[in-house]
Image: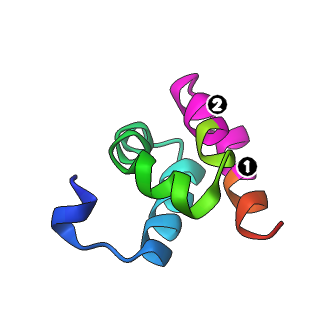
Amino acid sequence: MDLKEEGLPEGELVALLETLLSRDDIAANRTIRDSLPILRVMLGEAADRIHRAAEAFNYPEALELLKKSKNP
C-alpha cells in the first residue's frame, strides 16, 4: 500500500500499525517499510527501532515502541 497515494492521514497510519502489530500481521512489515520516511518525521529515532523490531517479527516489541513513541 502506497500511503502517499492512498492519502492516509498520519493518525490513521499509527492506528493501522497498532492494529496490524497487535494481530501479528505480516502486513505490518510492508506498511512500516513503505511509510518509514513519514514515520521518521512523526516519531524520530523510534521509527527505526520499530522498523527493526518488525523486521525481526518481534511485533509485541514494535507495538510497545510505537505506543511509547506516541506518548513520550
Query: Which of labels 1 and 2 is toward the front?
Result: 1
Q: Which residue carries the number 1 mark?
A: 65
Mostly what secondary structure, the magenta segment? Answer: helix
At mark 2, the secondary structure is: loop
Is residue 50 within the magenta segment?
yes
> Which residue appears at 66% of the width and 50% of the height?
63
> In the drawing, what numbered circle is on residue 49?
none
Which residue type carries mark 2?
Asn
Does 32 sit left or right of 69 as displayed? left
- Percent x, y for residue 25? 45, 43
Q: Which residue is situated farthest in the top direction here?
A: 56
Q: Is residue 38 magenta?
A: no
Q: Which residues are magenta?
A: 49-65
Residue at screen point 73% across, 49% down: 65
Quadrant position of residue 70: bottom right
Lower position in the chain sequence, tag 1 or tag 2: 2
What is the CA distance from the residue labelled 1 to the residue labelled 2?
11 Å
Picture coordinates of residue 16 (x, y %)?
45, 64
Residue 17, horizontal then vertical, whole percent: 50, 57
Q: Position of residue 4 (x, y in %)?
A: 23, 63
Which quarter of the rendering shows the C terminus?
bottom right
Label 1 environment density (alpha carbons within 10 Å; few <14, some 14–19, many ≥20): some
With respect to residue 72, does 46 lie above or below? above
Give, as a three-letter code, the residue at label 1. Answer: Leu
Q: Which residue is mark 2?
A: 58
Residue furthest to the left = 5
Would you place residue 53 above or below residue 3 in this image? above
> Dot 2, how many residues are within 10 Å of its Cα: few (below 14), some (14-19), or many (20+)?
some
